[in-house]
Image (spheres, grey):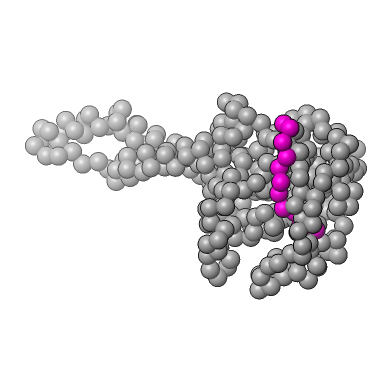
Amino acid sequence: MDFDFSAILLGLTVLFGVVWGLDRLFFYKSRKAKADAAGKEPHEPVAVDWARSLFPVVLVVLVLRSFVAEPFRIPSGSMMPTLDVGDFILVNKFAYGLRLPAFNNKFVSLGEPKRGDVVVFRFPGYLCEDGGKLVRSGDQSCADPHAPVPNQNWIKRIIGMPGDRVEMHGDQLIVNGEPVAADLIGPYEGDPKRAESRLMLEMGATVWNEHLPNGLGGVVNHLTARMPNYAVPPPLPNAHVPLVVPQGCYLAMGDNRYNSTDSRWWGCLPEQNLAGKAFLIWLSWTGSSVAFHRMGTVIH
């Protein structure tokens, strides 16, 4: 089962606020008057005492997580070598505007993603055909086009903006007719005791420094991994992904280019699914110890 922690926080905030507010409006005065008449201190019911104590705490946590920064844990190797499994990251929640917690509807626009940004988003679902129409499904095989889409947060890198012409042929990324340059750094080096690293070592993965134009005259230099011995991802464009990125959508890919389920499979990322911009690794857990050298790393 997928839990939406923001929805839980919102529900608790509303519950505690309503209990406390109703007590103050309708019951507190009479309870205090009776206590004063008896020469005693008024005693709050247990439920009201808990609501009064917890409401401000839960409210502060909700506001911070919804509008300032939210922690996430990296669950897979799709963003290796930039982000490793077990990295705990912070996500800027106001970089792309303020959104209502749980509902994710934007009510204040503060900015838009740029090419090269590492973004966290709600998984939109796989593109499947149903009666001649494309629908979003939680079933990657599309055997059940109406399978519910899991409520999950994913992380990828923006490589295509609305209106961009994006192509991917093998290892070569082409944006608006210009091949994106990348320099070979060398063979991937990782811990063979960890499953994700062992796979990359066995497949002979190599690490590259990609120079992705950000669309503003600058370049985002970031690491990617290639391991063509592992799998051959779909090219871009393909049957479900057009050459030109639709308006209100972005193309997103993992830095582990041969081991990332991304826009090449499920199409464009709708703008309303964005959750924020990843900017910092604040903790990294290898499974048996803390990787202190990764703590405090700024995400590029």
> Image check: 230 left or right of 72?
right
> Image check: 82 left or right of 129?
left
**Is residue 196 in view?**
yes
Q: Give the residues drawn in magenta, as a range.
A: 216-226
Tell me which secondary structure the magenta stretch mostly adopts: strand
* Residue beneath the point at 61% across and 45% down: 278
The image shows a total of numbered marks equal to 0
**Which residue is nearer to you in this view: 52 or 170?**
170
**Is residue 128 in view?**
no
Residue 216: x and y in percent read: 72, 31
* Residue beneath the point at 65% across and 38% down: 274
Residue 156: x and y in percent read: 70, 47
**Which residue is nearer to you in this view: 95 or 291?**
291
Residue 86 located within the stretch drawn in magenta: no
Q: Residue placed farthest to the bottom in the image?
A: 193
Residue 54: x and y in percent read: 36, 43
* Residue beneath the point at 31% across and 27% down: 25
Q: Residue placed farthest to the left in the image?
A: 39
Which quadrant is the N terminus positioned in? bottom right
> Image check: 243 left or right of 279?
right
Please say if 68 is above or below 200: above
**Which residue is nearer to you in this view: 210 or 245?**
210
Q: Quadrant of residue 21?
A: top left
* Residue beneath the point at 34% across and 31% down: 22
Residue 173: x and y in percent read: 84, 45
